Amino acid sequence: MARASQTRTAVLGVLTIEPATGYEIRKGITEVLGHFWHESFGQIYPCLAELVEEGLVEAVAGDRARSSRFRITRAGRQRLQELLEEPVAAQPPRNGLLLRTFFGQAMTPRALATALDSAEQEARARLGSYAAIRSDIADDPGYAEHGRFWEATLRAGELTAEASLTWVRETRESLGL
Amino acid sequence: MARASQTRTAVLGVLTIEPATGYEIRKGITEVLGHFWHESFGQIYPCLAELVEEGLVEAVAGDRARSSRFRITRAGRQRLQELLEEPVAAQPPRNGLLLRTFFGQAMTPRALATALDSAEQEARARLGSYAAIRSDIADDPGYAEHGRFWEATLRAGELTAEASLTWVRETRESLGL
DNA sequence: CCAACCATGTAAGTTGTTACATGATTAA
DNA sequence: TTAATCATGTAACAACTTACATGGTTGG
């Protein structure tokens, strides 16, 4: 059966921006969508092969040996639209930090405090990276079409990171850590 | 090889509260940890069998035929502490709503607006359920030990849901939806 | 008596990661 | 020349979901 996951959605989506090799697709997902999406090579290459077979993307000659660029077809754009309009499938939640917090009495206060420190550092790092991305957005040649959407996803990251910092602060206080 | 995932951590954790059947463990995870954790039966039963084999939990007679309660052993508590003190393994991000937002120009404004509506409704529903859980926490006989930790996880849910509502509001505005 | 819930377990399938293997190209 | 990056692909494994199969118990 055809791959039912959202990997297809992400790959087709990236190819609407410009034709790309598998390597570039993965790089784009990591660098641009990285704060809310992830794909590994082991997903991308088989997925591309399927998409070609279904006529949703087509391979064009690449810059170098053993490389091919993939371009989304008209059918691919149509399919992408359908995929995007399907209801969002929420991934089952698995928050390791909250699991540790919930069972906090089974660990040393020191260890829980360390976990909170890590969460804080990670949130700060994310906020820092978002500031850098804001410049990238302004420089993007496709700003008029993509920019506002890109900014919206970035804003989600900021709000999440800020909520995370608020939570760490409050939790340190309420648990006396 | 032994199951390396955090299912063991969650199961052992639940059993620190009181001995339980597999069914009760699943129920407890769904009802109490549901806003940040998830396990299916297909994970829990094999995991319990492994834990028994390793001496981390032991089966005691259950209330009825074909049922057994599982009790965490001293070794199990020790193992749980070690597991909790391991660094939090962040699950790779896959946010379907942000994926749709990023590729928002490839879908109709109407469809994106619908996705935002769903996100808003879901966040509101979560806030409602947290209010109900707050009463449960106050009623919990183990409040003094567990309650503060439980409340902290709930607060995380509230902050996340509120951040989500803020984002939906801002995004509707910035994208004119 | 019957619906809802309690209870256990397995098998098949899907999804995804990681490690490995291979080699071309480019910039220092 | 050599390290980094570009590029592709597969095989093994790990994790997880879902559907199925089975039957006991309780409350209305």
Image (cartoon, coloured by chain):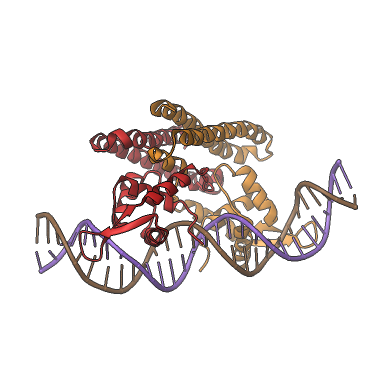
Chain colours: A orange, B red, C purple, D brown
The quarter of the displayed image where residue B143 is located: top left
Which residue is at the front of the view, B43 or B61? B61
Residue name at image x 52 percent, y 55 percent: A6
Looking at the image, is A138 positioned above or below residue A7? above
The quarter of the displayed image where residue A146 is located: top right
Residue A93 visible: no
Which residue is at the front of the view, B46 or A147? B46
Residue A27 is situated, as x and y percent measured from the top left of the image, at 67, 49
Residue B160 visible: yes
Residue B111 is situated, as x and y percent measured from the top left of the image, at 46, 47
- The number of numbered badges drawn on the structure is 0
Residue name at image x 38 percent, y 38 percent: A105
Which residue is at the front of the view, C28 or D12? D12
Residue name at image x 67 percent, y 62 percent: A58
Residue name at image x 42 percent, y 59 percent: B54
In the visual, does C8 lie left or right of B8? Answer: left
Residue D19 is situated, as x and y percent measured from the top left of the image, at 36, 68
Residue A28 is situated, as x and y percent measured from the top left of the image, at 65, 47
In the visual, does C27 lie left or right of B17? Answer: right
